[in-house]
Structures are given as C-alpha cells and as structure tokens.
Amino acid sequence: MARAWDSSRAYAESKLHMVALAFAVAQRCPNVLSNAVDPGWVRTRMGGAGAPVDQDTGKRMQSWLAVSHDSTALFSGGYWRNLQRQQPAAEATDTRFQERLVAKLADLTGVEMS
C-alpha cells in the first residue's frame, strides 16, 4: 500500500529498524557483541546548530562500547544512550518484528542472514 512521504516518520522508522536489526544480530550471532546506540540530538548539518549534544559527546558512546573492558559494556542486544542501557521501543524487542525485518532485508538485498 502506498502512503504519502513523511520525512519524520521515515527517519523514526529507520532508527527502529536499526535497533531491531542489532537485536536480531545479537540473537543469531552469540559470539558477536551487537548493540544499538542512540547518541541523542547531535549538532551536525542534519541536527542543526540548536541541538544540545556536541559531536564529541555523540561519538563517546560508540567508542566506549567498541573498546571498553567494563563488564557493563560486554553485553549484546542492548540499547544504549548516555553510557547507560535504556529500554528501546517495544517493537524493536519483538522477535516476530525482527524476523519480518530480516526476511524483508534478505528479499531486498538478496543476502540471507545466517
């Protein structure tokens, strides 16, 4: 079904899909740490000069998760903001939603996720 373009909705849906995909990877690949990170509203060309988070602060979360040996960071399937695990949208944690997303991505790209 076609619908009118809504840039805000498209952006929000893309973020939901990224979180759900990170969780699907965490489920399917237990030897891989896969997390979703929300850096917040960051001052960039997209975020604008009025955004409350500077770029260094926005990058800090990803860097911390990538290199930290802190037991808090050695977790897979988490949603992180401000160096803390947060509760994501319920849909992102729904395994049926994740499976539909993975199937759709495989259909669109021709790449199956094992």
Image (cartoon, rainbow, N blue to C red):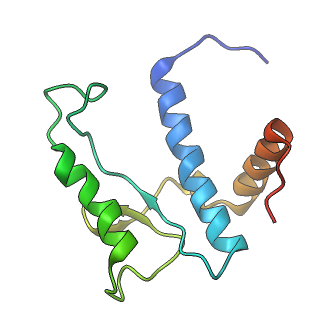
Instruction: Please indicate, yes or no, whether residue 81 appears anywhere in the rendered image.
Output: no
- Residue beneath the point at 26% across and 67% down: 83
Give the vertical position of 71 relative to 88 (above or below).
below
Give the vertical position of 11 relative to 60 (above or below).
above
87 or 107: which is nearer to us? Answer: 107
Which quadrant of the rendered structure holds the N terminus?
Answer: top right
Residue 82 spot, x, y in % from top left? 24, 61
Residue 56 spot, x, y in % from top left? 18, 51
- Residue 91 is left or right of residue 67, and the answer is right
- Residue beneath the point at 65% across and 80% down: 30
80 or 114: which is nearer to us? Answer: 114
57 or 93: which is nearer to us? Answer: 57
Instruction: Please indicate, yes or no, whether residue 30 appears anywhere in the rendered image.
Output: yes
Residue 95 spot, x, y in % from top left? 71, 62
- Residue 114 is left or right of residue 83, and the answer is right
Residue 29 spot, x, y in % from top left? 69, 74
> Extreme front residue here?
67
